Amino acid sequence: MYRLTRCFNVSSKMYVLTKSLSLTNILLCFLFDITASQDFSSSDNIDISIQRCTLNVNWTSEKADGCNLSYRVKLYQNETEIATIDTAALRYSKNGIDSDSYFRIEITPMLRCRNNSNLNGRKRVKSISSIPDGQSEYITKNISENVALECPLKGAYQPLKVEWQHILGINSAVVRTFPTELVNLQRVSYKDMGRYICTIVYTSCGTLMSAEKSRSFVTLSVNGPPFISSSQETVSVSLGGNLTLELNVISFPPPNSQVVIKNLNGLAIFREMVSFTTGLTPLQAFGKIIEVEGYNTKLSLMNISQEWIGTNTIIVSNSLGNHSFKITFYNYSDKEKNNFFGKIFCTCALL
């Protein structure tokens, strides 16, 4: 017959189900009691942040299993306890913090059950510094997604002025500026990638210190289908002749090796595996031509036939999709003929 056996730590109220008080059961009971009495600390389910001069804390709920659940929240400033509250909410805020302290939050679930027993759950602990500190952030977005950039100056401060510069290309060209605290980018494309440098003029919280300045940056990477950033849009060809066509492509992830060209009728007149090499690629962004890292290749078009004449579509792809680019092929002899008749017409008109 099984029975409830109390563990040997008199201060605890832990029980285990045992058949007899054998040495094995004694050891199991002893280990169970030690484990239950440990202070387990975890910060995985606590979100602590500072917004201006306010400390905000949010946490996830515990399982109550029929008991009334509340939380004991303790706040420490530089290892000195400054606040203790009991709350049933899942959030806590402290207004008016200063800009030169470290804060630690301790959250302990408390269960009051129907049998009048009181149990404490595992303590959660997390810390944060209120000292203003410029940091860097790296964000990756997919093409056509939206993103809001906030200057990564962490800590407690009051911003007086915020300015942004968007830096793009290998020469770190400034392509645009923003006078706003947040930079909201809608439907991002490859021209939005690069480094966004922010400069904040601010004052500290809780002091009368003069204004200070800090610089931070956010690097935005953009993933998406490839983009043909430059190629010839019109080409004169001779029937039966050959042509080398150069493509400059921006692509994250890298482009697939296969390139396809389709004519006006949708017929694939070129389908080959080509070799893309990394190199500088021109990108038109916000009224400027910027050189960025990309991929280059050359297409060898052999024995041009009549089906090539007209507007064709070049298609490049990667694992996220494909991109098409229109290119028009003119028959060299037809173009020369048109120029000839044009000259005659002009001469006749003058007469």
Image: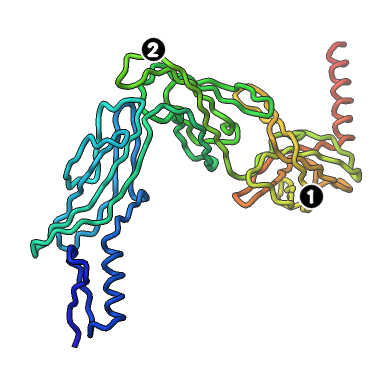
Q: Secondary structure at mark 2?
A: loop
Is 110 left, or right, of 219 in this rendering? left
The residue positioned 22% from the left and 71% from the top of the image is: 7
As drawn, 20 above or below 42: below
Residue 128 is drawn in which quadrant?
A: top left
Residue 294 at x, y percent in the picture: 70, 38
Is 172 left, or right, of 310 in this rendering? left
Residue beneath disc 2: 210
Quadrant in which the N terminus appears: bottom left
Residue 220 is drawn in which quadrant?
A: top right
Residue 163 at x, y percent in the picture: 48, 19
| Number of numbered discs overlaid on the protein picture | 2
Specify which label sits upstream in the sequence, 1 or 2: 2
Viewer-side residue, 345 vs 53: 53
Q: Secondary structure at mark 1?
A: loop
The residue positioned 42% from the left and 23% from the top of the image is: 181
| Real-space CA distance between mark 1 and mark 2, rounded to the nearest whole angstrom | 61 Å
The residue positioned 44% from the left and 33% from the top of the image is: 148
Residue type marked 1: Val
Viewer-side residue, 319 vs 335: 319
Is 284 left, or right, of 95 in this rendering? right
Q: Pointer 1: residues within 10 angstroms few (<14), some, or many (20+)?
A: some
Residue type marked 2: Ser
Q: Pointer 2: residues within 10 angstroms few (<14), some, or many (20+)?
A: few
As drawn, 74 above or below 153: below
Residue 114 is drawn in which quadrant?
A: bottom left
The residue positioned 56% from the left and 21% from the top of the image is: 176
Q: Residue furthest bottom?
A: 1
Residue beneath disc 1: 274
